[in-house]
Amino acid sequence: MSSQDYTPERAERYWEKTKALMWLHLAIWFIFSFAIHFFVSPLNTITFIGFPLGFYMAAQGSLIVFVVQIFLFAYQQNKVDEEFGIAEDA
Amino acid sequence: MKGDFVNNLGRIYTVYTGGFIGFVIFLAILEQLGVSNQIIGYLFVFLTIGVYAAIGYMSRTMQVSEYYVAGRRVPAVYNGMATAADWMSAASFIAMAGGLYAQGYDGLAFVLGWTGGYVLVAVLIAPYLRKFGAYTVPDFLGSRYGGNMARTIGIIVLFACSFTYIVGQVTGVGTIASRFLGIPFEIAVFVGLVGILVCSMLGGMRAVTWTQVAQYIVLIIAYLVPLVILSMQKTGVPIPQLMYGYILQEVAQLEQTKEALAGARAHMVPFTTFNPLNYFALILCLMVGTASLPHVLMRFFTTPSVRDARKSVGWALFFIFLLYFSAPAYAAFAKLEIYSDVIGTAIATIEDVQALPDWVFIYGAIDLIKICGIGAGNAQALFDACQASGAEEVIRFTDFSINPDVIVISTPEIAGLPYVIAGLVAAGGLAAALSTADGLLLAIANALSHDIYYRMIDPQASTKRRLVVARILLVAVAILAAAVASTRPGGILALVAWAFSLAAAGLFPALVMGIWWTRTTKQGAVWGMIIGFSFTLFYLVGTRYFDMPLWFGVSNISAGLFGIPTGFLAIYIISKMTPEPSAEMQDFVRQLRIPKGGVMMEEKS
């Protein structure tokens, strides 16, 4: 598709999708930055590979989620770009 | 040659890594042959700096886009490594594990805060700044909010948060260099200065990028090797990150049963240092600050595409993660060692005291470990001090104090490893401090040379002239930072923690709103930055120097908790009150959101 086909309507739809993806990932970010750690004490009663789970989530669990999340976001956003024909030429 | 270099990165850095490992093994053999520790220290410091300098020299350039954004040819993985080195400072390398030792669970606020911010970078900011094609963060502000006002405020915020930070890094370089070269701190600072300049002056961003990759490799090897060996010794499994859960169980066991540990706070129990409000406020400020610090954001200007900019954030966080998820293991192993072999140990007779581990006296001699109130280099002094202080039978928790920096540095000695490993750790700390200093130096000097000189003073300046000015300013900023650092400004170092709240409140709202809300006006952004920044500064200065009471008990370091929402609110309200941006500006924002089509701010050739 040529860039001439990128009408304002398509731009609008593209941006809606991009925004939805943004909010989704901010929600995941919020959960693993804050929400899950509100429950550190109850989580600590569970043991996970030798760690109390609440401690583990702050020391490693959330970090792993962040790393995976960014790669996932990059993949998803690229899919959206391609769908609307505005990804960069590889 | 240039094309060759980028195409052969994998091979070049594999050879480099192998060469570095070979170099460490060679030094280990020298040590066995009886070469003195001091010579090994010299070889470590000078050979690593020499390699960085060689990379810096080979990456010299006379092209503006090479100097400012490494020609936008840095592949995502390598930019990730460079960003990780750029990001992880002497504080991450040396002090973080110590903080975790002292604060237990609450110290994890730093681990979370200094990683989660990259999600915000990837989702909200970096791809769009890359599309715009800025050379600096103020450059984007100046273009989006038309005019020099937004640009100038951006430079002020940048300077406020980056300068104290670079002074901290230069101090770190000086401390390590002085210890391993045996020269006075004031001179070591200027040795460090040379180390910083050789990496950045000739090649700008291009040189800094390739030295940062090299520095990352050194720092991550140096961080992990002692820890892996220690884990192997203590648990039989060379994966410390998995094994320290069991170590922590033993620590918890000791905390509950060992009488001498009375008064020690439980390592895994939350909210013993910070209350929940301050814990979460600190995480927020560190995360949002991460996503606003100019020396981090500008690294993502160097990728070949918007797509690569996003992926590169993932790689950056992955490489940062390798160190950050290991730091708590350092704290755990050190704590078990200290709780089982030092605290509760009998000191009733001089023979008992002589039986203490050697490293207690090695670090006691330089006052980094204090027992019974003194830093003792030998058993007799320690015995006398403890008898005099009333701790006659055993060392109690309250008799013992350790400088947080010692946790990482002393691990080789705790594990009984040869001196070459201690030298390796020092080389790693040096790499961490140098790489961060380089990134900060470029962020500051480029804002002066590109935004002030080229954009505001002489837009007609020739390429040659711009690059000469850029280098003069670079050297001037570096000398200024070293001069300030050589006075050992304790007060300034405490202010480094402020950088996060100041950047978060001053820059984050204007960057995010400028990209995500077309309606954001120039006045809205300018006032939003001024209000967010000065409000945060007011709280920081007021609570620290003028006995202003804390609001809702929110500690100084988390001032951004008030500043960030204030900045957003100010931008929103004032933008609503002012006429909407021109059609051209709205079109500019729409362009920003389309990855295809190359950068918007093309350099005239």
Image (cartoon, rainbow, N blue to C red):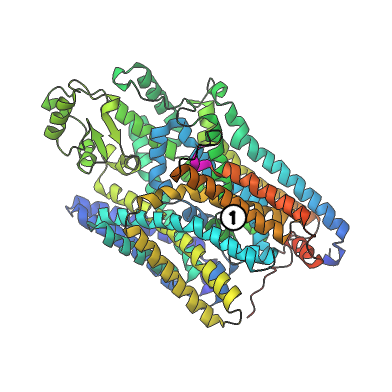
Evaluate whether residue B48 shows in this view.
yes
Q: How many marks?
A: 1
Q: Is residue B209 above or below residue B399?
A: below
Quadrant placement of the C terminus of chain B: bottom right
Residue identified by numbered label 1: B312
Would residue B203 be counted in the magenta stretch?
no
* Horizontal side of residue B166 vs B573, given as left or right: left
In depth, the one of B272 and B98 nearer the eye is B272
Q: Residue at x 42, y 70 (%)?
A: B476
In depth, the one of B44 and B508 nearer the eye is B508
Locate residue B600: give its quadrant: bottom right
Would residue B556 be counted in the magenta stretch?
yes
The subunit carrying tag 1 is B
Can you give x and y, in whole percent of width and height, for residue B562 in the image? Answer: 60, 42
Can you give x and y, in whole percent of width and height, for residue B323 in the image? Answer: 46, 45
* Horizontal side of residue B459 vs B393, given as left or right: right
Evaluate whether residue B305 shows in this view.
no
- The segment highlighted magenta reads B554-558
* Horizontal side of residue B174 vs B280, given as left or right: left
Q: Is residue B288 above or below residue B470?
A: above
Can you give x and y, in whole percent of width and height, for residue B556 in the image? Answer: 49, 41
Secondary structure under badge 1? helix
